[in-house]
Image (spheres, rainbow, N blue to C red):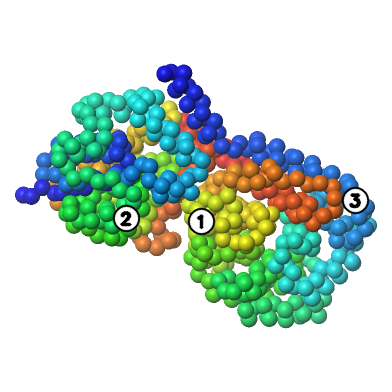
């Protein structure tokens, strides 16, 4: 049986989630990584669009990233540290993976531009594993023979969009809908593609939102790999999402600091 | 190394501090204090409309009417207002008009909720003739004059529903006709002018609150979803500033009206995303609000700033009431 070919698309070269997914895909039988795409961190277009989106908080984001990349352990939880060492992840960048395994690699300004599309066509992927939450257009989505997989940091279809680790707590729906991650195929909407699998997260031992968020990474990596295996073993079952504004889950947006504090308070009370 | 990390960490915390609610309260108090000072210095202004304005502002802030000729509202002011609606209906489009400011402040005051202007049938007929003329051209995505006509109809609908100028059924029919010409997805499209839409949307929600099964319910829900997207994804400080050529205070006032609409929608649809969006939106206008000053001179600029201050106060009070109820 032929290997399934996957391309990994990451927002930055050093994204831990992408590094772990790539590392585990390389270990997986019947799976080959045929290409890696990352976005250029310092492209004017990207900085400009991020600035328009989050304003001066962009400086905070950059500083935090620089800090985390300097291995400041305050930014990584013990769970993640343990995971990294137990899996034997040594490379600190996707470029290093590409060099070690002769995997085609490209840094682009935009995931939807001509350069990316040309590269992707050359890789002839069965699957693209999307890391991060960039909007991907139809021209990109149509290239992989099976589709583009994404793990969303919330339970679908109820919690689409951003800040969905906090919103179920704010809305006091952590009991009925729960907190968790959802593996789904991407389409042109925001988290509206067919659902493959959901994984709830146990929040009983979380002391803070930071604790909670660190659990997400582990579950997201695990769910993405489940998805790759399901495709390889032809065991996919899909649950389409309803395609109208009334029945579809709400789209959420990033939370105000005070809403985030409320979520944290409710997380502690939830226990 | 650890010192530099501490410095960077402190710097990050400083950048992340954002605008605190206490910062808003400082501005809120300062503006209300300046407004009261304006009232004290202009209490002897003999113009009916100024008396009416000052009295309403005083009642809104301190909860008490001023003893100034009962501000002539019952007789003289009704005459002025009716005459304006009969003859200068197009002036409603402008924000730099004391009658507009008065009506908005009047509506902000909960105590005036059941007020009815009770204008004569003859005047009502005249206003309806004017509206009919405007309806022939009114469009949210047309030429300047067509947009102006839509803005006037919007304001008049909102004032009518809140002050009983024209019958509710008549206003409903006007609104119904207008929404037939614009889909929920076009309201906040990037190229469209936003100014004036708050009045229209607040009219829709006014009717839906009165009757939750109203014909406008689904339409309003879709419009709200798109407004939310516009506020959250295109994070302009005031959403009018990029496309519309209005004065900053006009943009700010419209933003505050829209924020009020969004808060009302959040309550109506029982949806905390709207409160979240307004909290961010209010933070975004903080810097502009902190530069506003109200002096004692009876200028239109001061009256405009008083209106902004009272809308800001109203927004923050509702925001904090809603946030407080979550604890």
Question: Given the image, what chain letter belongs to the residue carrying mark 2?
Answer: A
Q: Judge whether A221 appears above or below A206 on screen.
A: below
Q: Is residue B75 left or right of residue A109?
A: right
Q: How far apart, in angstroms, are the residues tagged by discs 1 and 3?
A: 42 Å
Q: Which residue is mark 1?
A: B230
Question: Given the image, what chain letter belongs to the residue carrying mark 1?
Answer: B
Which label is found at residue B43? 3
Tags 2 and 3 on a common chain:
no
Q: Secondary structure at mark 2?
A: loop
Crowd tier of the residue under label 1, counting other residues whose Cα lies within 10 Å: few below 14, some 14–19, many 20 or above? some
Q: Kindly report which numbered mark, 1 or 2, lies closer to the viewer in this rendering.
A: 2
- Quarter of the picture containing the C terminus of chain A is top left
Q: Which residue is mark 2?
A: A112
Q: Quadrant of residue B106?
A: bottom right
Q: Position of residue B63 (x, y in %)?
A: 81, 47
Crowd tier of the residue under label 2, counting other residues whose Cα lies within 10 Å: few below 14, some 14–19, many 20 or above? some
Residue plotted at (23% across, 56% down): A118
Q: Quadrant of residue B77?
A: bottom right
Q: Judge whether A185 appears above or below B189 on screen.
A: above
Q: Is residue B155 left or right of residue B235?
A: right
Residue plotted at (27% across, 53% down): A116
Tags 1 and 2 on a common chain:
no
Q: Secondary structure at mark 1?
A: helix
């Amino acid at each position: 049986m032929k290997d399934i070919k996957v391309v990994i698309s990451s927002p930055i070269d050093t994204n831990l989630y992408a590094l772990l997914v790539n590392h585990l895909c390389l270990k997986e039988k019947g799976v080959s990584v045929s290409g890696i795409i990352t976005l250029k961190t310092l492209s004017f277009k990207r900085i400009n669009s991020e600035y328009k989106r989050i304003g001066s908080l962009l400086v905070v984001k950059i500083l935090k990233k620089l800090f985390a990349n300097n291995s400041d352990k305050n930014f990584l939880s013990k769970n993640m540290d343990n995971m990294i060492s137990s899996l034997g992840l040594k490379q600190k960048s996707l470029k290093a993976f590409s060099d070690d395994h002769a995997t085609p690699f490209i840094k682009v300004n935009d995931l939807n531009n001509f350069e990316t599309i040309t590269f992707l066509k050359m890789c002839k992927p069965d699957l693209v594993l999307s890391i991060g939450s960039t909007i991907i257009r139809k021209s990109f989505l149509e290239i992989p023979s099976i589709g583009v997989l994404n793990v969303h940091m919330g339970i679908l279809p109820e919690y689409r969009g951003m800040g969905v680790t906090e919103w179920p707590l704010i809305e006091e729906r952590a009991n009925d809908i729960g907190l968790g991650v959802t593996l789904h195929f991407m389409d042109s909407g925001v988290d509206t593609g067919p659902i493959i699998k959901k994984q709830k997260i146990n929040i009983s031992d979380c002391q803070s939102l930071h604790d909670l968020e660190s659990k997400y990474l582990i579950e997201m990596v695990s769910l993405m790999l489940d998805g790759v295996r399901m495709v390889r073993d032809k065991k996919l079952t899909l649950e389409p999402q309803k395609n109208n504004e009334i029945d579809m889950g709400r789209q959420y947006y990033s939370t105000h600091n005070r809403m985030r504090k409320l979520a944290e308070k409710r997380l502690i009370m939830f226990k | 190394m650890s010192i530099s990390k501490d410095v960077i960490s402190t710097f990050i915390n400083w950048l992340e501090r954002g605008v605190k609610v206490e910062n808003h309260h400082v501005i809120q108090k300062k503006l209300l204090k300046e407004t009261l000072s304006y009232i004290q210095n202009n209490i002897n202004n003999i113009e009916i409309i100024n008396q009416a304005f000052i009295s309403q502002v005083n009642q809104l802030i301190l909860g008490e009417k001023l003893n100034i000729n009962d501000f002539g509202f019952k007789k003289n002011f009704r005459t002025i207002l009716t005459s304006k609606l009969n003859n200068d209906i197009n002036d409603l489009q402008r924000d730099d008009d004391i009658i507009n400011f008065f009506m908005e402040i009047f509506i902000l005051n909960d105590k005036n909720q059941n007020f009815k202007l009770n204008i004569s049938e003859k005047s009502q007929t005249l206003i309806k003739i004017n509206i009919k003329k405007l309806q022939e051209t009114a469009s949210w995505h047309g030429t300047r004059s067509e947009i102006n006509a839509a803005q006037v109809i919007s304001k008049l609908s909102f004032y009518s529903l809140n002050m009983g100028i024209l019958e509710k059924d008549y206003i409903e029919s006007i609104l119904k006709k207008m929404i037939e010409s614009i889909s929920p997805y076009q309201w906040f499209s990037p190229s469209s002018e936003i100014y004036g839409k708050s009045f229209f949307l607040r009219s829709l929600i006014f009717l839906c609150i009165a009757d939750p099964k109203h014909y406008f319910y689904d339409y309003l829900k879709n419009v709200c979803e798109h407004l939310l997207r516009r506020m959250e994804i295109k994070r302009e400080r005031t959403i009018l500033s990029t496309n519309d050529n209005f004065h900053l205070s006009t943009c700010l006032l419209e933003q505050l009206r829209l924020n009020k609409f969004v808060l009302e929608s959040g309550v109506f649809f029982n949806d905390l995303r709207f409160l979240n969006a307004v909290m961010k939106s209010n933070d975004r206008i903080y810097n502009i609000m902190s530069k506003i000053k109200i002096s004692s001179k009876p200028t239109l600029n001061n009256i405009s700033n008083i209106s902004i201050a009272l809308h800001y106060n109203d927004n923050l009070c509702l925001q904090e009431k809603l946030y407080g109820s979550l604890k």
